[in-house]
Image: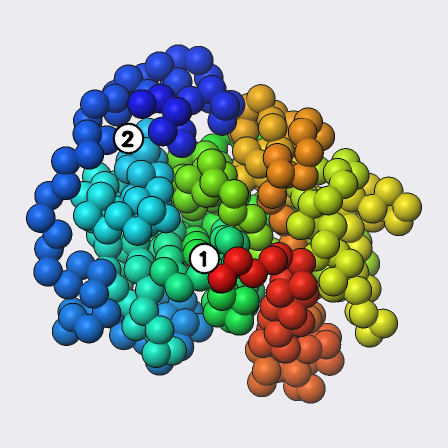
Amino acid sequence: MLTKLGIGCSRFGWAAAAVLVACSNNAGSSETGVASNLAPGIADCSAPTALQAQTMVDFVTGIQHAYSYAALSIPEMNAVIEAVHALDASDLNRAAEAAPRAGYRLAPLVAGGACYWVLLPPGFPGAIEQAVVVYAPAWQRNLVLEAPHAHEDHNTDAEAALVFQSVAAKALVVSGSHRCVQGVASSGCRLTAECSHRDPTTGSTPAIPPADSDPAHSIHNALNAVHLAFRTSEAIELQLHTNAHPEINGDSLVSNGTRYAIAGTVADALYTALQSPDVHILSCNDLSAPPPKNAFCGEINTQGLASNGAADTCLGRPTSNGDASQHRFVHLEQSNYRMCRAADVGANPLCLGSFDEWASRVGAAVRVAVPAFR
Ligand SMILES: [Zn+2]
């Protein structure tokens, strides 16, 4: 029972007390294997109740991000993990049973003519606090696309949707609430400067405790639960970010979530595949051409910590332990100026290209870096 739970167990770096509570709370309650009757149309794309979107980009960019945030409890985290494991096993009954324990529901989605299974958080289709999960039953690449700052890292939600479809990835996870919701408690994880303001006197932007509403810098959120769920599979997890510092991070900075050279990772393969004379592509793991010390390598990213053997996925540090199969996280930083809306290219002198152009470039590189299985 303990090994089936993706969270609350020591391999994910939880405090010992939380381990016992989390694992014992769930033992026996949810994985008895007794299937209920599946509600009609629960993941049947021909059902009249199926969600409909012209394209996956339309679906994802139509998501409303809340300005409020409440963290998930550990049982809710475990429910999301179980729902994801169930989808990945094509066990829709179990997914439909587990999802409501986190306030989620399973629904079919028709987008771009294809059928998907989605886990919809509380509030959807209104403003949501927790992540939306899209699962492609006809996936070809065992790849999960994560957009943890869907609104703030501009156009990464649409980019993630484009790449998800163009490479036939397995799953797409789009964050819920805004990243820096005011008045939300800190996650207590490693300090970041992403939600602080520039001090006009010193000119510096201080690193502060991150808000719990930032799913890449907190633990108790559905995006992290989905990450942990796929972490126990063979899936590659590619997380998309943007930044306004190409002088530090180039047009794109690829990282395995550490600054260690680890042979044979998908991060390295993506770094190689993205190389092109017209763009400046950097890697945190190419010791022959290291990025600046302040480059955004994702070393304090909670999903990166979970995927790189950190003893504590909130406050710990990534390790180089194990081979490439133990480092399946890819943290991709991209310049805002490569990720403009098409209408701004030409109109805004800073814009070097549109996000859809950039998404095709990333998609082409992903097709080379990540093998197709079927
Ligand atoms: Zn980001």
Q: Position of residue 282 (x, y in %)?
A: 79, 55
Residue 76 coordinates in the image, percent (x, y):
29, 35
In the figure, 186 relative to 330: above or below? above
Secondary structure at badge 1 equals strand
Q: Position of residue 181 (x, y in %)?
A: 43, 47
Q: Does any atom of ligand 1 lie closer than 8 Å to the CB of label 2?
A: no
- Write down the residue under mark 2: 75
* Mark 2, secondary structure of its residue: helix
Q: Is residue 212 left or right of residue 271?
A: left
Q: Which residue is depicted at the point 35% across and 39% down?
A: 81
Q: Label 1: how many residues lie within 10 Å, few (<14), some (14-19) or many (20+)?
A: many
Specify the quadrant of the image occupied by residue 261: top right
Q: Which residue is mark 1?
A: 170
Of the image marks 2 and 1, the number of the one nearer the N terminus: 2
Residue kind at label 1, given as amino acid type? Lys
- In the image, residue 171 sits, relative to residue 56, either above or below, namely above
